[in-house]
Image (spheres, grey):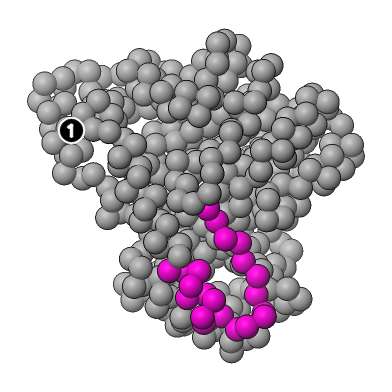
Amino acid sequence: MIDYNDFFADRVKPMKGSAIREMFKRMADPEIISLAGGNPASELFPGDELSKIAGKILMTSPTLALQYGTTDGYPKMKDCARARAEKVNSYRDGDAIIIMTGANQGIDLTAKCILNKGDKIIVESPSFIGSLNAFRTYECQLVGVDMDNDGMRMDKLEEALKANPDAKLLYTIPTFQNPTGTTMPLERRKRLLELCKEYNVLIIEDNPYGDLRFSGEDVPTIKSLDTEGRVIYCGSFSKILSPGMRLGYIVGPAALLEKIEILKQVNDVHTPMLTQLMCVEFMKKYNIDDYIEKNRALYGKKCKAMLDTMEECFPKGKLEWTVPEGGIFLWCTIPGFEGDMNDIVNKCLEKKVAIVPGSNFAIDQSLPSNQFRLNYSSVPIEKIVEGVKRLGEVLTEVL
């Protein structure tokens, strides 16, 4: 047999698949309660509405739906995305917009456009594994910045920028961050922008969860504070409509997006026309904000159920956790824990519950972790309660 390691490009050899995806393979057992994924609540998907819309499109406009489209996106789809960005003051004069096949494609292509081998990118530590893997693909250096319950720490960011004055790019999820669920306050956002201006660093602001606030007050996006075209803003329809439709978008200076559009043309030619047309028709026929409000209400109830059960069933005084005001994740820490978090993960699987160890979101995934992520969006409330009870039993046994 051929040893394909002799053929892999150097940049690919050290890459590993997402451990979260690998875990799904172990969760084929229908009895396992998954608190590990990041899926939206499938019970909220507007399946009936979208099936009727898709049927009508294929009956009345088959050529438009099934033919090639423009790389930057169907114009009416761009209008829909622009309306979502304008709702949070994140589209300005001089900006352009490109429809992406999922927001992560926008992050990947932006990194591809900007980063050379060996370049440095500042990231939150921990951060979203999909973006970290995209950055690793381009053989850049990840510079992690510690976080607290208010997101990225600005004192640590300033230290990182001073130590790495040649950094080109900063990546942040300031609102309901993945994996921690934290939200960066306005003053920190202003300071982040000031520091990036001082050190001439571009910013990718990833905001897939911003519409999912169920408590507290909205915080302006970093993009809305930017007056010089420093921020590339990434939005998504995955968490407010359907992840399977693979619809995201990026907003940024036209001169930069012109290059990114060329990269997308090479990457996938264009985002599928059928799903773009379905989204446009849904947005025209229904009030998307009413639909989003249903998501917010349900996630608020699910989050409360998880937090209440954690308070009741976790060993007292042994853990700390974040209390999100929106989004779909929260983050747990076991102070002083020096064991192997994978042992806890495996014991959980034995009890038919799945969680994700914090090492998956680390800059250096080989280091031990005393943290784990929980998701409350994807399973019913009664399963959240039962899953957290089983997790509590494991934690009590181990700690």
Q: Is residue 261 visible?
A: no
Number of disc labels? 1
Pick the residue in front: 108 or 323: 323
Residue lying at 69% horizontally and 16% vertically, measured from the top left? 228
Q: How far across and how far down the image is residue 387, in percent?
A: 43, 75
Q: Secondary structure at mark 1?
A: helix
| Foreground residue among 341 and 195 | 195
Residue at horizontal 53%, vertical 32%?
Answer: 234
Compared with 66, 18 (above or below) is below
Please give the residue where the numbered disc 1 appears in the rendered image: 54
Residue in view at x 40 percent, y 56 percent:
299
Tell me: 217 left or right of 299: right
Q: Depth check: 370 or 383 in front?
A: 383
- Does 187 appear above or below 214? above
Q: Which portion, as a residue range, is magenta?
A: 305-325
Image position of 357 (left or right of 68)? right
Q: Amino acid at mark 1?
A: Ala
Residue 380, percent across and down?
A: 33, 66
Q: Is residue 285 left or right of residue 121?
A: left
Q: Is residue 164 magenta?
A: no
